[in-house]
Image (cartoon, rainbow, N blue to C red):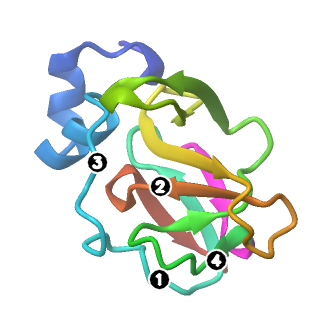
Amino acid sequence: MSSKAQRSDAEWRAVLSPEQFRVLREKGTEAPGTGEYNKHKADGVYNCAGCGAALYKSTTKFDSGCGWPAFFDAIPGAVVRHTDESFGMERIEICCSACGGHLGHVFKGEGFRTPTDERHCVNSVSMTFSAEK
């Protein structure tokens, strides 16, 4: 059996919805304001929709008004950063460290009153949510 991190495209397509595959595996982006977790407010943990790894605690989520769920920090070791030079600009892409699934991008220095002055702009379709018990 393949590990979660080393699945073929066919294996990923079998376990992800077409939209999850487009975003997580093909680095797509969902339309702003359409995601399930954009205005979601509950205590718990946001997990990778691809492999189930814990990514963000609800205590780091904030309303940035950007149209996507925003977090000021990830669970330590959960997210890796890469330089993304697509669309003629340089951004910081964030991916699940366990399976490599595309989550979104990090923006720095926007002046949000958060401990890190970062905004992790994450596609809702890249995540699932587990409520605190």
The kind of residue on which mark 2 rests is Val
Mark in front: 1 vs 4: 4
Q: Which residues are magenta?
A: 53-59
Give the mark nearer the N terminus: 1 vs 2: 1
Give the CA separation, mark 1 to mark 2: 13 Å
* Image height of 83 relative to 41, above or below: above
- Corner quadrant of residue 43: bottom right
* Image height of 26 relative to 127, above or below: above
The kind of residue on which mark 3 rests is Thr
Q: Quadrant of the N terminus?
A: top left
Q: Which residue is mark 2?
A: 122
Which secondary structure lies at badge 4?
strand
Give the number of the disc on residue 40: 1
The kind of residue on which mark 4 rests is Phe
Q: Count the labels in the image.
A: 4
Give the mark nearer the N terminus: 1 vs 4: 1
Residue occupying the point 83% across, 58% down:
116
Which secondary structure lies at badge 1?
loop
